[in-house]
């Protein structure tokens, strides 16, 4: 009896010792299952969000060769002289030879050649008339106001103006908190204010040095988006600023670099088209404050996945444009952004080379090429390292 009691006591002790171990194992298993379930849910949720984000991209044709009905022949089209398209095609052949070739002969198996010609829009010249008259097959333009009802238009990418100031530590970008308003720009470029202290009292006495780019396209967009096409403001702009302070964007950027290298304070501010102003680090691109009183910065830091800030190093070349800030249907869209169009006649009796050319540029291949030379694609492009459908 004593032996049995001792054995029962021992078995009971072993059961009690084993029970907590079993309970711990069950608990760990439950936690693993719960954690796995949560991870799977979040993974599926994020996957769904990503699929929705890139749904438009995934629906595009992959490359030029998939676009049908490309007509054979020699076609001539135009764009603004010194404008976005002109700049893209005239850049270094070492970097953009592929783009130039593809835009000239986009489909190898079809004898179609697209020849670009500059058009000077000064003196109220209208490039749409060149298309209407038949002298040109189609046009590339961002000047939506000149497109008439007898023309079709297709968006191929987004463009915009960047406003930039001298970029160095403890300089204007920090003092301005990386932003400037449309109203402040209007005051600067009509001569209403002449010192940075009038913009921000915390800035030391520093004369304003506003510059205007030579690109007629950029100036036209500035008059519309900043000066609201106000005749009085435009007259002040042309008389007080543009008459004496117009120069190539590259020269303005060089002046900024020289001042920074000499550690001189400079109150330079200028603006220009995206392709000429975004991929450099001499000028800091200011976020633009519109009527919503919210600063919108189109340039994002790739590693930190947020808008660039004055403390960032713009020379590391890791920045990109946030596509969604260029969609005009959004409340927080970039105030100085705008679409680029291919414009061609509605007359069906004429060769629809413009429509086909636009369709090729709206393929994944076309959007990638335009993105690489400084334009903003119509939809977000997946990271090529994660998705073979990317650039």
Image: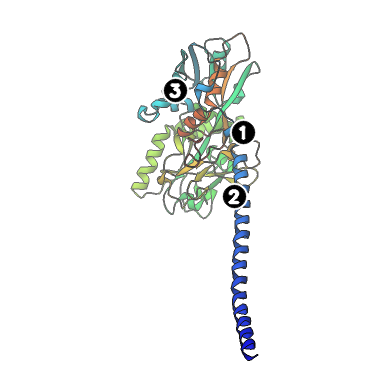
The label nearer to you, 2 versus 1, is 2
Tell how many labels.
Answer: 3
Pick the front one: 61 or 138: 61
Checking the image for residue 102, the label placed there is 3
Please name the residue shown 44% across and 51% down the image.
Answer: 171
Along the polypeptide, which appears first: circle 2 or circle 1? 2
Label 3: few (<14), some (14–19) or many (≥20) C-alpha neighbours in 10 Å: some
Say above or below: 90 vs 162. Answer: above
Q: CA distance from mark 2 to mark 1?
A: 47 Å
Please give the residue where the numbered disc 2 appears in the rendered image.
43
Q: Quadrant of residue 48?
A: top right
**Which residue lies under the disc numbered 1?**
228
From the viewer's perspective, is the residue at label 3 or at label 2 nearer?
Answer: 2
| Dot 1: element | loop
Considering the image in quadrants, where does the N terminus appear?
bottom right
**Residue 48 drawn above or below residue 26:** above
Question: Please, what secondary structure does the residue beneath circle 3 have?
Answer: helix
Classify 335 as above or below 82. below
Q: Is residue 323 visible?
A: yes
Give the residue drawn at x 34%, y 47%: 261
Considering depth in this image, is 121 or 366 the residue closer to the camera? 366
**Percent x, y of residue 3:** 61, 89
């Amino acid at each position: 009896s004593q032996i049995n009691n001792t054995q029962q006591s021992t078995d009971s002790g072993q059961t009690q010792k084993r029970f907590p171990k079993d309970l711990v194992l069950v608990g760990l298993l439950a936690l693993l299952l719960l954690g796995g379930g949560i991870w799977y849910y979040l993974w599926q949720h994020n996957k769904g969000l990503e699929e929705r984000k890139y749904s438009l991209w995934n629906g595009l044709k992959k490359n030029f060769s998939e676009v049908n009905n490309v007509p054979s022949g020699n076609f001539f089209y135009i764009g603004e002289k010194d404008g976005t398209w002109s700049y893209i095609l005239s850049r270094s052949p070492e970097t953009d030879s592929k783009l130039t070739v593809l835009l000239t002969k986009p489909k190898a198996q079809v004898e179609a050649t697209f020849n670009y010609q500059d058009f000077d829009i000064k003196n109220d010249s209208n490039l749409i008339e060149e298309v209407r008259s038949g002298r040109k097959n189609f046009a590339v333009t961002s000047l939506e106001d000149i497109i008439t009802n007898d023309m079709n238009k297709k968006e191929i990418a987004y463009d915009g103006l960047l406003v930039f100031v001298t970029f160095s530590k403890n300089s204007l970008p920090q003092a301005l908190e990386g932003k400037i308003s449309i109203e402040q720009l209007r005051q600067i470029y009509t001569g209403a204010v002449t010192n940075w202290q009038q913009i921000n009292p915390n800035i030391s006495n520093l004369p304003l040095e506003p510059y205007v780019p030579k690109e007629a396209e950029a100036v036209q967009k500035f008059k519309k988006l900043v000066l609201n096409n106000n005749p009085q403001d435009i007259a002040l702009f042309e008389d007080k600023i543009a008459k004496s302070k117009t120069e190539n964007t590259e020269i303005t950027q060089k002046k900024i670099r020289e001042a920074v290298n000499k550690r001189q304070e400079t109150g330079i501010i200028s603006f220009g088209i995206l392709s000429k102003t975004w991929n450099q680090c001499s000028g800091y691109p200011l976020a633009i404050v519109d009527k919503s009183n919210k600063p919108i910065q189109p340039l994002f830091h790739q590693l930190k996945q947020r808008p660039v800030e004055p403390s960032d190093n713009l020379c590391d070349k890791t920045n990109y444009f946030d596509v969604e800030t260029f969609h005009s249907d959004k409340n927080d869209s970039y105030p100085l952004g705008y679409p680029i169009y291919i414009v061609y006649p509605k007359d069906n009796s004429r060769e629809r080379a413009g429509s086909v050319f636009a369709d090729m540029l709206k393929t994944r291949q076309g959007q990638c090429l335009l993105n690489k030379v400084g334009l903003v694609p119509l939809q977000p492009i997946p990271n090529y390292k994660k998705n073979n459908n990317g650039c």
